[in-house]
Amino acid sequence: MAGPLTEAPVERPASARAAMMDWLQFLAHERRASPRTLESYGAVVSNFIFFMEQHRGEALGLAGCSDLRAADFRAWMAHRRSGDHPLSARSLSHALSATRAFFRYLDRRLGVENAELLLVRGPKLKPTLPRPVSEQAARDLLEEAAADEDREPWERARDAAVLTLLYGCGLRISEALSLTRADAPLGDELRITGKGGKTRIAPVLPAVAEAVADYVRQCPFGLEPSDALFRAKRGGALGARAVQAEMAKLRGRLGLPSSATPHAFRHAFATHLLGAGADLRAIQELLGHASLSTTQKYTAVDAEGLLAVYHKAHPKG
């Protein structure tokens, strides 16, 4: 009779740096982390390993990872705060989070434990609130994009379609630009794969569907169903930086602050829904937030907006 199934033993890498490469492969293939996440995490942990090797005067192996003390981790954090390129408190918190993720991998996959890291606290962060554009600013930006004389007519239609998707469906830039020709024409709802491979359904307003349909009619490129829907001037897939650059130009013309970014449309989507009485749980689902606490930040934004209106309109304000 066959015995119980057991996992095949994992071959232990020879060094911390080799373990880091295995970890990044794990994140890419099993966790489906984005290239940007892999680049960020890899840079942080590579810096951590380099510092520890200089700090200890020897190559860092797996046994060395297990032997690190809380003081060693704090020394690295102090170095990142005061080195040639000091990190902000928020960036340092991200770096510590990435390092903790690496050590969780060492523990769970390779049996390399280090409880000292649990004793290390990250820097205190000032709470930041989302900075949405106002309803009027959103309308002005959409109208300005559709009337931009520096663009060809099909490019104006494209820019208006992308920004309308961000505001009308609450999408991230990457999500809007991940749409393919097969997704158009849009139906009543759109299936979106967001962060961490999580899928959600976004309702599509008629204005959003019309903006995308107008772009598709004018797009000069023949596209296969699997091709990216939104195209750059020379026919390649439209990139996020091009959208950000166009937004910067539009807000400059309208005299809007630097916080009027493409992502501010997503914030506006949530804030304006909340102001209209939408349920917080429903907004969480529409945005694809894993935690309700992330969505709850919009309640503070909405409260600030209500107070601003109160102080402006009240006779004693």
Image (spheres, rainbow, N blue to C red):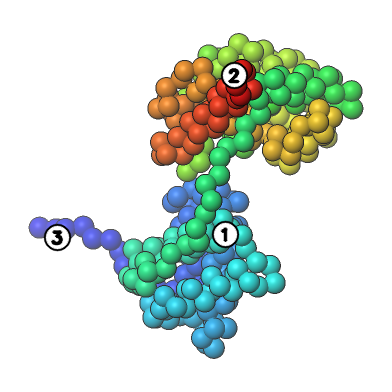
Q: Upstream in the sequence, badge 2 or badge 3? A: 3
Q: Which residue is mark 3?
A: 3
What residue appears at the point 44 percent right and 60 percent down from the top-left corner?
A: 101
Instruction: Tell me if residue 180 can be seen.
Output: no
Helix, strand or loop at label 3? It is loop
User: Mark 1 or mark 2: which is in front?
Assistant: 2
Q: Quadrant of the N terminus?
A: bottom left
Residue 24 against residue 214 in the figure, above or below: below
Q: For this rendering, which residue is in front, 139 or 181? A: 139
Position of 218 relative to 284 (above/below):
above
Name the amino acid type tagged 2: His
Q: Which mark is residue 89?
A: 1
User: Crowding at label 2, few (<14), some or many (≥20) Cα neighbours within 10 Å?
Assistant: few
- Residue 228 position, x and y percent, is 67, 32
The residue mark sitting in front, 1 or 3, is 1
- Which numbered tag is attached to residue 314? 2
In this rendered view, identify the residue nearer to me: 269 or 204.
Answer: 269
